[in-house]
Image (spheres, rainbow, N blue to C red):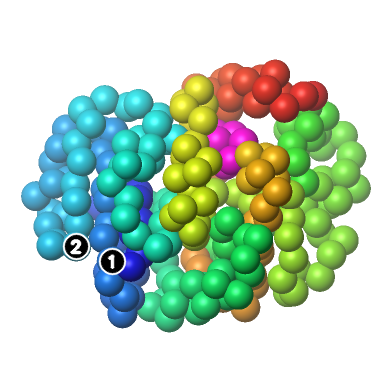
Amino acid sequence: MISASIVLFNQDIKVLQKTIDSFLKIKLEKKLFLIDNSSSNSLEKVLNSPEIEYIFVGKNIGFGKAHNLVLNQLNSDYHLILNPDIEFKPLVLSNLIEVLNENINVSFITPKVVYPNNDYQHICRKHPSFFDLINRKLKISKNQILKNEYQNCDLEKSFYPEFIHGCFMLFKTDDFKKLKGFDERYFLYMEDADICRKIEKSGKKILYYPNETIIHHHQKGSSKSIKLFFIHLNSAFKYFLKWGF
């Protein structure tokens, strides 16, 4: 049994439908939670399936808090934290579950992530530092960015990075529940970095597994919007106050 949750906010329905179709095509017992932070529930009419539970929040409560709304409802073996702009083939999840089962000390697994043009997305990172945040914006040290993204490693091989960006995080449900989901103090951004820290603190690991590939229509919102940039900055300071600079 696998469950998944997607947080929605004024989504492009065409892209979202591809994500939903990718999940519903898998040959496993499944349930998909769609948590809608939009001001209108217009998506409810078009997202109709017995394997979908649509939850209309009516306001934007943030990414982590919205995912946590279904925490007490999860009775699955595996839970997928899924972005609304992802595409993948039906066997990807089955294969990832098999690998996850073989790794007792791993809390979640993530495959290789590429853009629609097949360019590689660097989702594996070292734990963020204050300098890394500044460096990514100002490009002070290109070498530091390469090291921070593990670009000095063979990214075609599996390994245990410190932090994986959270567009597709396949958890063992019990581990996700023991972590109490995401820290709700982050409205948007850094909640994935935070949960990776919590996993490390619990004595477990996260696994990057490039033998499987998914497509991410990544928008890089905080680099294009000044509002999202300041939200990102606010989350970063909360993260550093919690875990150190």
In this view of the protein, which residue sits in the foreground, 118 or 57? 57
* Region rendered in magenta: 189-195
Secondary structure at numbered mark 1: strand
Hey, what amino acid is under mark 1? Lys
**136 drawn magenta:** no
Which x, y percent locates residue 208? 66, 64
Q: What residue do we see at 13% from left, 62% from top?
A: 50
Asked whether the residues under the numbered discs 2 and 1 touch, taking CB atoms below 8 Å apart as contact, a structural biologist would say: yes
Mark 2–mark 1 Cα distance, whole angstroms, equals 7 Å
Determine if residue 228 is in view.
Answer: no
Location of mark 2 (residue): 51
Which x, y percent locates residue 62? 40, 29
Number of disc labels = 2
Lateral position of residue 169 relative to residue 45, left or right: right
In this view of the protein, which residue sits in the foreground, 77 or 116? 77
In this view of the protein, which residue sits in the foreground, 38 or 170? 170
Secondary structure at numbered mark 2: loop
**193 drawn magenta:** yes
**Mark found first going from the N terminus, 2 or 1:** 1
Determine if residue 106 is in view.
Answer: yes
Q: Which mark is residue 217?
A: none
Hey, what amino acid is under mark 2? Glu
Quadrant for the N terminus in the image: bottom left
Q: Image height check: is 3 above or below 64?
A: below
Q: Image height check: is 9 above or below 26?
A: above
Q: What residue do we see at 55% from left, 35% from top?
A: 191
Location of mark 1 (residue): 30
Badge 1 crowding class, 10 Å Cα cut-off, few under 14, some 14 to 19, many 20 or more, is some
In this view of the protein, which residue sits in the foreground, 153 or 158? 158
Q: What residue do we see at 79% from left, 24% from top?
A: 245
